[in-house]
Image: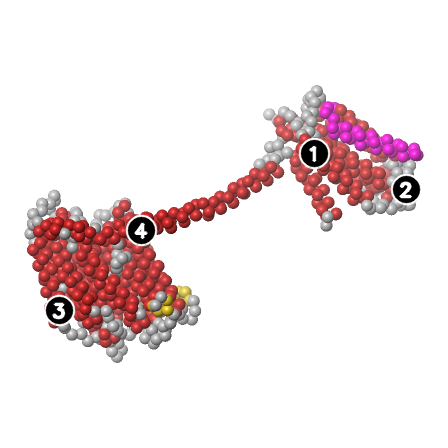
Amino acid sequence: MDYSFTLLILILPFAIFIFIGLLGGKMKPQLSGILGTSGLFIITLLSYVTAFNYFSHRTGEVFQSIEAFQFVWLQFTDTLIIHLGILLDPLSVMMLVVITSVSLMVHIYSLGYMKGERGFSRYFAFLSLFTFSMLGLVVATNIFQMYIFWELVGVSSYLLIGFYYERPSAVAAAKKAFIVTRFADLGFLIGILLLSFHTNTFDFTMLTDINGPAIAHPATAMFMGLSVTTWAMLLIFMGGAGKSAMFPLHIWLPDAMEGPTPVSALIHAATMVVAGVYLVARLFPIYSFSSPDALDVIAYVGSFTSLFAAVIACTQPDIKRVLAFSTLSQIGYMMVALGVSGYGGEGLGYMASLFHLFTHAFFKALLFLGAGSVIHAAHTNLMTEMGGLKKYMPITHITFLIACLTIAGIPPLSGFFSKDEILVAAFEHNKIIFAVQWMVAGITAFYMFRLYFNIFWNNTREYHHTPQESPATMTVPLMILAAASVFSGFVPFHDLVTSDGNPLHTEFHWIIAVPSVLIALVGIGVATTLYYRKNTKPEAIANGVKTFYTIVYRKFYIDELYLLITHNVIFKFISRPIAWFDRHVVDGTMNQIGNTTVFFSGAIKEMQSGHVQLYIWFFTSGVLLLALLILYLN
Amino acid sequence: MNLQGEIPLDYMIVLSTMLFFVGLMGVLIRRNLITMLMGIELMLNAVNINFVAFNHYLFPHRLEGHFFALIVVAIAAAEAAIAIALIINIYRQFGTVSVDDVDELKY
Amino acid sequence: MTGPKIIFFVLAAAIVVFAILSITSRKILRAAIFLLFVLVAISGLFYMMNFQFLAAVQLILYAGGIVVLIVFSILLTSQINSKLDPPKLNHLLSGAVTAIGGIVLSSITILQFTFKPTHTAAIGTDMRTIGRQLMDTDVHGYALPFEVISVLLLAALVGSIFIAQKNRT
């Protein structure tokens, strides 16, 4: 069937961005909010229609990848063309559904959360811009289009993190996010150039074709022991690592919590940070066949990041920071799953990673929106200043509890299914990574329930003004997302999204499922004993391992390390000389040219001195000189 | 009398050249506007001598040089009148006729 | 040394010497008188070349008109008592170099050409011939320049009156 209506899914948010951006100042704020939300509602419906139609038609066993729309943007050679278009295949259709649904929930939530704030229209304009960019990224037909939208997503993220631009911390966080991801994108661009140079194409269909130039005849040039394709894929992963905040490029994500909470829900939990995972999944055939070394790197980086982030999350007092590190940890899971995956029949890791992406989007968005609800009511971000909110905010409480159970991996919630598949895939490939991920599952359960108990139990706190349940515009999305968290686990993902399009056969492994649930319960138990009622046990434990606790609390001093390097190395040895060069050589040359001109003009202007005799003398001596030259010295 | 035999044309030419450049030097050296005018008159007269000499020596059957010199005299008279009028105006404006003080058309 | 030669050399010497004195004199009235002498000597030169009418016109107009005008302007600008400033040294040097260079260059250039003497009969220079030529409208007639010069004189007349008038209050 004709899928060209999917172009509307991209055009509509962009049009809304332009419209609200230009006219938002002249409209009532509520109007821009309603406009943004209704636009998003339309495209959510359209993506559901697309998904329904797409997944109901199989050709043989495989889902077709369809180019719904394509036009030539820049043509270099016959095959090296930058198109702009829409590619529909299981991966991108799934992402369309996720992005539009979460974005719609965030829009509806923001109508209540951002009510009365200054810059309301600007907020909705930026949200629409972000939605447009993210959608453009996932339906990209070629890697360059993806890069274009990748940068656009970075820009939207910058604008939204720095939304409260009068706060210097927000401005610094926005700069940090943009600079770190931009630095990573440098690697991405070099990887793109390497890859397209050797395969002579940008197009995804051609790149991931098993008989195509990237896989069947890869370039044989080697550099430092690794093939060119592996280098290209590693560099591309560097871009993905920046966007998905893998260690050591993770520093921007905790600081990005300076933005409004719905923004954190949309961008930094559910959609933008999974762009790196999406990138690896998109190029998975190349990774799998031509550069399995890169996949190993991805697995180890992801595993380390998830452990690292989970440990830090246990010590943070700020709710949003805990959730940020939790996001880092879960994305680490997704990267691990991709890293341990094979192709085709062994593509369990691939499917598990995307399944986890799918479920994570819903429950992480729910967690963030719930956190926003709590922050809105208690007027503070720190869980140390909260407690006992369960009697004031029942709906938020129940939905938050559901989300915590989901992320801990308790059956039959969705988190259990997706995390379990990842553990199975890891077990079959690399036992060490499996062990690490299994431990991280326990730590995850621990810190999530630490968060839960600190916010909703511990009834000893008195509040200045009684917190109230949030308005309906905020609680309805919470409920919808809670339902999604519960039921999305039952989606037959293995039939729909797999590495080669064929449905994957999966079976239930008791030997993995039972230990994973057990360790989650252990984590919950530890958290309950420490935080169910206010007591001194947590402080005692913290004082017992004081140095280690401080290091973890300060996030292993990675931020300080980065600052040290930039200030002492980059600024001193690179920026200062360049600045000196610019000021003295470049500007100096210009100034000297100016001074020379002034000097010569000073010398020449004497010729117009106003003395008539001087003019006459110039005239006559000039004539005589010319006569001399022409007559005698010719 | 016909000077053709006695005084060669070259003498007249040299004479008129010298008078011309003396007049030019007068224009360049003198600081008073009126004395500059005198130098200009000298130059005009040198030209007149030249015209008349060529007429007399090379084209005695025509009167072109003669009439040219006549016209030049008339024009010199008109020009001197205007120059004097200007000098008087300048004297009223600046209070001086020194050429160093009338240098306002400059950078 | 025939008569015309002596007269010519005397006149030529007078012209050059008085011209140089005129431009170097420090008293302005003396410069005007030296100019008068130059003009009279030139008139003598014209007379020698058989152009009596032109010599007379030169005397009347130049010596009797322009020099008088110059003397009037000297008196009107009240400089008769003050001494003129000597020229500045660099002006003097550059003027001298230009003048001497110009004399040398022009003389050398012109004197390289040999002027062939003609032997055609001379036309008369009596008033009748001059008058006829002046009013002639044929190819060698000078009626047009005559009329044009009269217009020019009118313009000069009107112009000088206008320029030199006192400012209308």
Q: Is residue A582 left or right of residue A505?
A: right
The picture places residue C147, in percent across and down from the top left corner, at 77, 39
Would residue C55 be seen by someone viewing this image from the given angle?
no
The residue depicted at 41 percent of the width and 49 percent of the height is A578
SS of the residue under disc 1: helix
Q: Which mark is residue C93?
A: 1
Label 3, residues with CA under 10 Å away: few <14, some 14-19, many ≥20: some
SS at circle 2: loop
- Three-letter code, disc 1: Leu
Mark 2, mark 4: which one is toward the viewer? 4
Q: Earlier in the sequence, mark 2 or mark 1?
A: 1
Q: Nearer the viewer, residue A383 or A47?
A: A383
Q: Residue A565 got which mark?
A: 4
Predominant SS of the magenta segment: helix
- List the residue tagged with mark 3: A513
Quarter of the image where one finds residue C106: top right
Residue mark closest to the camera, 3 vs 2: 3
Residue at point 54% right, 43% down?
A597
B74 up-or-down from A266: above or below:
above
Neighbor class of circle 2 (other Cα within 10 Å; few <14, some 14-19, many 20+) is some
Q: Where's the N terminus of chain C, which quadrant?
A: top right
Q: Are marks 2 and 4 in contact (CB under 8 Å)?
A: no
Which SS class for mark 4? Answer: helix
Q: Chain of mark 4?
A: A
**Highlighted magenta segment, given as a residue range:** C1-29
Amino acid under disc 2: Ala
Residue A220 vs residue C130, the one in the foreground:
A220
Front-lying residue, B22 or A22: B22
In the picture, residue A179 is in which quadrant?
bottom left
Q: CA distance from mark 4 to mark 3?
A: 44 Å
